[in-house]
Amino acid sequence: MHPGAVAVPPTPSATPATGPDPLGPATTAPATDPAGLPAHQPAAADLARVAARTAADLLAGPAPVRLGDVIPAPERVAADPTADFVLPADAAVRVSLDPAARDVGEQLAELLRPATGYPLPVTDVADPEGPLVLTLAGPGPLAVGVSGEVGAVDLGDEGYRLDVTTGGVRIVAVTPAGLFHGVQTLRQLLPAAIDSPTPVAERWVVPGGLIVDRPRFPYRGAMLDVARHFFGVADVLRVIDHLARYKLNHLHLHLTDDQGWRIAIDSWPRLATVGGSTEVGGGPGGWYTAADYRRIVRYAARRHVTVVPEIDLPGHTNAALVAYPELAPGKIPPPPYTGTDVGFSYVDPADERTYDFVADVLGEVAALTPGPWLHIGGDEAFKVKGAAYTGFVERAQRIVAGLGKTVVGWHQLAPAAHLDGRVLQWWGTNGDDPDIAAAVRQGARLILSPGNHAYFDMKYAPDTPIGHDWAGLIDVRRAYDWDPGTHLTGVPADAVLGVEAPLWTESVTSLAEIEFMLLPRLPATAELGWSPRAAHDWVGFRDRLAGQGPRWDRAGIAFHRSPDVPWSGEPAAPRPTVPRQLTAEVTDRASGQVHPDPAGTPGPPPATNGA
């Protein structure tokens, strides 16, 4: 086994193992004096409390959640119904001596405290033991097993092992990201009431057994278009929470478009103050200051989500041209645009001042972004053709590389010369794309966002009150029923970096509408990106998805109650409503009524791509 490898048991038989698990909380013999007698006799009251707790657990019945009822589906699950664990009120979270591990422990406590009402102190110790333990494994192999049988799996950068015994829960990973993903699994293994924002009288039981898990693809994400309609920092942070819950690890922010420029650039200040003052429907727009953007990046990083900023070039630039007409062909200032057409605007590819602009903007965004990616858009530049287009893209790619970042762009970048490491984001609807297959042969990697499976601005059904249908209707099953590893003809699975679900916001105007369009489809994308192909099963996914509904209800999260899913239970709290009439909502936005942002952020016919 190489560094990072963890030995795990093979797939279990129908009869669960009942012996002790080497990774469960350690059980040590009591200390003895020289005469061989126990050095410490438990007090009668302690024994009584243990006996009462054991009796209550035995009488209470099995856990309400099964070990496999998790989204995304784990790679390996070995349930042990005899090993259910009940979280006691005096539990503490114990973590390895590592600041990043401790932070994951703090996040676990933060997730569990509101509903349980338990204090859940967090301590870091050299050899953590107790009811909730998070352990960072060393760089070498970790030998574990059950019933004398072992196998080996490399947990990698994001994998984890989760053991549940009657004595507690232990999560082991090689990295803090792996621990964090294990925490998200533990969260789903607790009763749905764990998502309540206030204390609930509940038996906090976790089903017993073992999970060993790791992702299929390294890139799993969603995109939020904040250019067509602007969304404040608080809304973006809420979206990050949804991604983290389902082990999605990238948030792509579409920051610029014809209707608005959403990030302040010091060297070109009118981009925000002028270009950021509009949005679809005539609303007030808005933009992120550098402090706002840093806050988003920090919040995401704590949840092991990487922010991917997109500055769309050379097209989709009307807002920039309004702010700086010298970038426009002919130097003629265009009027502000609040509609939803595409393909009409572009920066002048023949003017050197344009490349000064590109270098300045990308340089400032790169400096604010610790992640490796810079997305330069590149789609629907209908008026920049042939050599003018490829020449612009090739210069922009070199600028990105010179900043130490990896270039990402929509798949229209493919005809431009390949740059080492380049990533193309494919949003087509036909899996036979010879140009993309050729780009892959040259070394390009792909993020797959097929418009007819992963574009979550598409309606669920003909009567969905918001959204588009140019790529077809995308119900939950359609969002789930495709395989990223085989979707494109001539593209091997190892060329696929991962998957992403874009949400374009021409018709989306509020956080409730964002959630309504993302959920319940977002967990489908998460499972496609994380779970092994062998776990892909619509019926099983549908049934596990049904269990998420009560959790979203408890948390006050808006979602589409898809008729494809056998939702269980009634809402435990009023569900946020989604406006039924888009026109009325746009009118409200035009009147300047927007949600206040605690961070102090200033306050279409369907497009072919939406970009």
Image: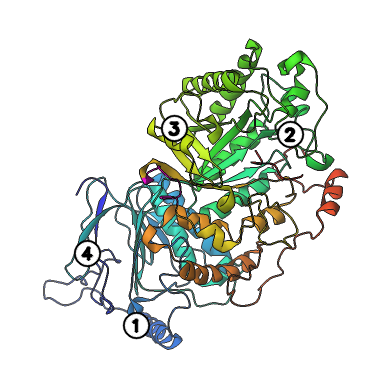
Image spot of residue 132 (x, y percent): 40, 63
The residue singled out by tag 1 in the image is: 47
Q: If you read the primary sequence from the N terminus, does the residue marked by circle 1 or circle 2 appear first?
A: 1
Regarding residue 433, the answer to whether it shows in the image is yes
Image spot of residue 55 (x, y percent): 39, 87
Q: Could you tell me how far apart the alpha carbons at marks 1 and 3 are, in whole angstroms?
A: 69 Å
Above or below for 515 versus 377: below
Q: Which mark is residue 260?
A: 2
Q: If you read the primary sequence from the N terminus, does the residue marked by circle 2 or circle 4 appear first?
A: 4
Q: Are marks 1 and 4 in contact (CB under 8 Å)?
A: no
The residue singled out by tag 4 in the image is: 145
Q: Could you tell me how far apart the alpha carbons at marks 2 and 4 are, in whole angstroms?
A: 56 Å
Above or below for 182 versus 311: below
Residue 551: which quarter of the image?
A: bottom right
Of helix, strand and loop, which mostly describes the magenta segment? loop
Q: Amino acid at mark 2?
A: Gly
Residue at the spot 23% in from the left edge and 54% down from the top edge: 142
Q: Is residue 490 magenta?
A: yes
Q: Amino acid at mark 4?
A: Gly
Q: Amino acid at mark 3?
A: Ala
Say which of 110 and 504 sits in front.
Answer: 504
Crowding around mark 2 (Cα neighbors within 10 Å: few <14, some 14 to 19, many 20+) is many
Image spot of residue 167 (x, y percent): 34, 72
Residue at the spot 57% in from the left edge and 55% down from the top edge: 242
Magenta residue span: 484-493
Q: Could you tell me how far apart the alpha carbons at marks 1 and 4 are, in whole angstroms?
A: 32 Å
Residue 460: which quarter of the image?
A: bottom right
